Image (cartoon, helix red, strand yellow):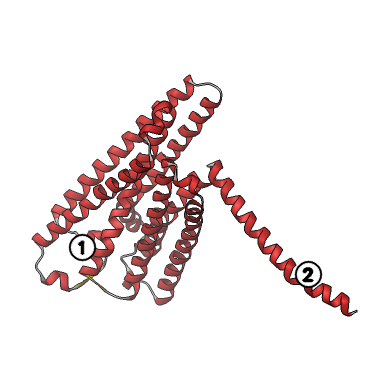
Amino acid sequence: MNSSTRQDSLRDAFTKNFISFSLGCFINVVNGAFVYIYFKNQVFQRDPRYVLYIHLVINDMILLTVSVALQIVTYTVPLRVAACCIMLLILTTTNKISPLNLAAMAVERYIAVCRPLHHAQICTVQRAYALIALIWGVSVTPFFTDLFILLATQPPSFFSGTIICYPSYVFSTPYHKTHSVTIQVLLFSFVFLTLIITYLKIFCAARAASGSNQASARNARNTILLHGVQLLICMLSYISPFINIILVAISPRDRTKILLGSFLLTSVLPRLLSPLIYGVRDKKFSSHIRLHFCRKCHSSVEKRVNRTGPRRRSKREFD
C-alpha cells in the first residue's frame, strides 16, 4: 500500500490506482473462474485437496480486494481509526491465512503419497473444513491482541481521529512491533519447516516408488516445491518495508514509483500464483475448465446458427 499520497499529483495518483485496480480485477476474474468451476462440479467438493485449494483462492481474492480498496481509499478520503481497524482486521487475517493454508495443503499431499492407505480416513472433507476454521481462528487472534494493546496504550480521542490506514501507523507502539515480529517469526518458521519436512518425505518416497506411484510422488514433490516459492513471495510482503527504505534512500525522487512497484510485486501479483500452481497444472481442474468453456462456445455458436437459420430460409422461400 502506498502511504505517500500527498506527494503524488492527481495524474500520478489516478495512474497508480488505475493500474492496481485493473490488475486486481483481472486476477480476481481469473480466480473467480476457478471458484465457479469448483462450485459447479461436485466432484471437487468431495475432495479435501480441492477444498483447501479453493479456500486459498477465495482467501487470495478477499486479500487482493481489500488491499486494492485500501490503497484507493488512502488516495481519496481520510479514514477514521475505527473503519481502518475493520479493514486491517480483514487484511492482516487473510495475509496470515495464505501461508498456513499452504502448509495444510503440503501435509495433505504428504499423507496422500506417503500414507496412501490411510489418506481416505485421515483427510476427509469434514476435517478439511475443521482445519480451515482452525486456520481462521489462529490467524485472527494476533489482530485482537494488537487491538487490546492499542486500547490500553492510546487515549479515547485517538479512535475518533483520522489516520493513514497502514498497520505500522495504527499499531505503532514498541509492544506492537515486538508482538508483530514474534508472530511473523513463529508463523513462517512453522510453515517453512512443514514444507521442508513434507518435501523431504515425499522426495524419499519418490525415489523408492516405481511406475505410477513414482509419477504421483514426483508431481506432489513439485507442487510442494512451488508452495515453497509461493511462501517466499508471501514473505516479501513482510520484508518489503525494509527493502523500500533502502531503495528510497538510494533514489528518493522515485519514492512513489518504488512503493507502487513493491505493492504490485508483494501484494497483487502473488495472488495469481494459486490458479497457476494448482488450477493450470492440475489435469482434472484444467480439463473441467476446458470442457466448460468449450461447451459455452459451442452453445453460443448454436444460438447464432439458430437465429440466422430461419432468416435464410424465409429469404429463400420469398425468392
Front-lying residue, 56 or 70:
56
Q: Residue at x 69, y 66 (%)?
A: 303
Q: Residue at x 33, y 55 (%)?
A: 244
Q: Is residue 211 above or below residue 296?
A: above
Q: Residue at x 39, y 45 (%)?
A: 52
Q: Residue at x 45, y 47 (%)?
A: 45
> Quadrant of residue 204 in the image?
top left
The local crowd at label 2, few if under 14, some if 14 to 19, many if 20 or more residues have their Cα within 10 Å, is: few
Cα–Cα span, label 2 and label 1: 65 Å
Amino acid, disc 1: Val
Q: Is residue 175 above or below residue 311?
A: above
* Residue that label 1 marks: 170
Q: Quadrant of the C terminus?
A: bottom right
Give percent across and percent down for residue 308: 76, 71
* Residue that label 2 marks: 309
Front-lying residue, 31 or 265:
31
The local crowd at label 1, few if under 14, some if 14 to 19, many if 20 or more residues have their Cα within 10 Å, is: some
How many numbered discs sit on the rendered protein? Answer: 2
Residue 110 visible within the image: no
